[in-house]
Image (spheres, rainbow, N blue to C red):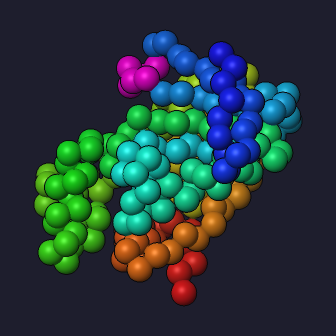
């Protein structure tokens, strides 16, 4: 299905949105194709987990919204593939994520808050993302991510990650501790001043 998406104020990209049936996790994820990405030898791919608070509401507590907007612009300029994965709050869900926010207000970092709520540090899996890419016949990708776990799981599920492009560092006073926790607990490649 062809859908024009706003990638910046007043700037639209014509995209193709592809849905899938029978994914490993049974969820409704989207794959968005920009330009000629499906015919590129090594297209740039962004696996982006849903973040209502950051992507839609503009929360400054995370870097999700800025990372998504960065990916949309980059892919509009050179082609690319966005996988929008329904895994809110590192897959603990929206309400639990808001409970984790409340615990972070008491001094916990985002991973400590997840543990206090009896969740894993990060419950996301990327097997469905790999299924989506393989179903489209993509042999190799360049991943747009700071998260080494995405690369590990894609490779484990048959996707060749040719190279990695790091996202920008989107630091605010409100997300500095969150970004440091992602580096410390999950090994994200983020240079924080």
Q: Compared with residue 61, is residue 42 higher up or lower down, i.e. above or below?
A: above
What span is in magenta?
23-28
Count of all numbered marks drawn on residues in the image: 0
Please identify the quarter of the rendering in which residue 78 is found: top right
Q: Is residue 103 left or right of residue 139?
A: left
Q: Compared with residue 23, is residue 53 higher up or lower down, i.e. above or below?
A: below
Magenta stretch: dominant SS?
A: loop
Work out whether residue 152 or residue 171 is closer to the camera in this orientation and state it: 171
Residue at the image position 20 percent from the left and 48 percent from the top: 96
Q: Find residue 161 and report its horizontal and vertical position in percent.
A: 69, 45
Residue at the image position 43 percent from the left and 23 percent from the top: 28
Q: Find residue 126 and report its horizontal and vertical position in percent.
A: 48, 38
Residue 128 lies in magenta, yes or no?
A: no
Q: Find residue 133 and report its horizontal and vertical position in percent.
A: 64, 28
In which quadrant will I find the C terminus? bottom right
Q: Is residue 72 left or right of residue 114?
A: right
**What is the residue that sits farthest to the top in this orientation?**
21
């Amino acid at each position: 299905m062809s859908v024009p998406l706003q990638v910046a104020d007043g700037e639209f990209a014509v995209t193709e949105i592809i849905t899938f049936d029978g994914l490993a996790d049974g969820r409704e994820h989207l794959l968005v194709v920009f330009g000629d990405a499906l015919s590129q030898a090594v297209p740039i791919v962004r696996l982006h987990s849903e973040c209502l608070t950051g992507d839609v509401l503009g929360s400054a507590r995370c870097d999700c919204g800025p990372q998504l907007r960065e990916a949309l612009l980059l892919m509009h300029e050179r082609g690319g593939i966005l996988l929008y994965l329904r895994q809110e709050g590192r897959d603990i869900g929206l309400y639990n994520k808001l409970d984790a926010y409340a615990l972070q207000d008491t001094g916990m970092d985002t991973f400590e808050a997840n543990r206090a709520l009896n969740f894993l540090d990060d419950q996301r899996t990327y097997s469905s993302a790999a299924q989506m890419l393989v179903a489209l016949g993509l042999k190799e990708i360049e991943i747009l991510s700071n998260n080494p776990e995405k690369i590990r799981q894609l490779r484990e599920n048959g996707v060749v990650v040719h190279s990695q492009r790091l996202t920008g560092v989107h630091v605010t006073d409100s997300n500095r501790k969150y970004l440091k926790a992602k580096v410390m607990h999950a090994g994200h490649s983020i240079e924080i001043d």
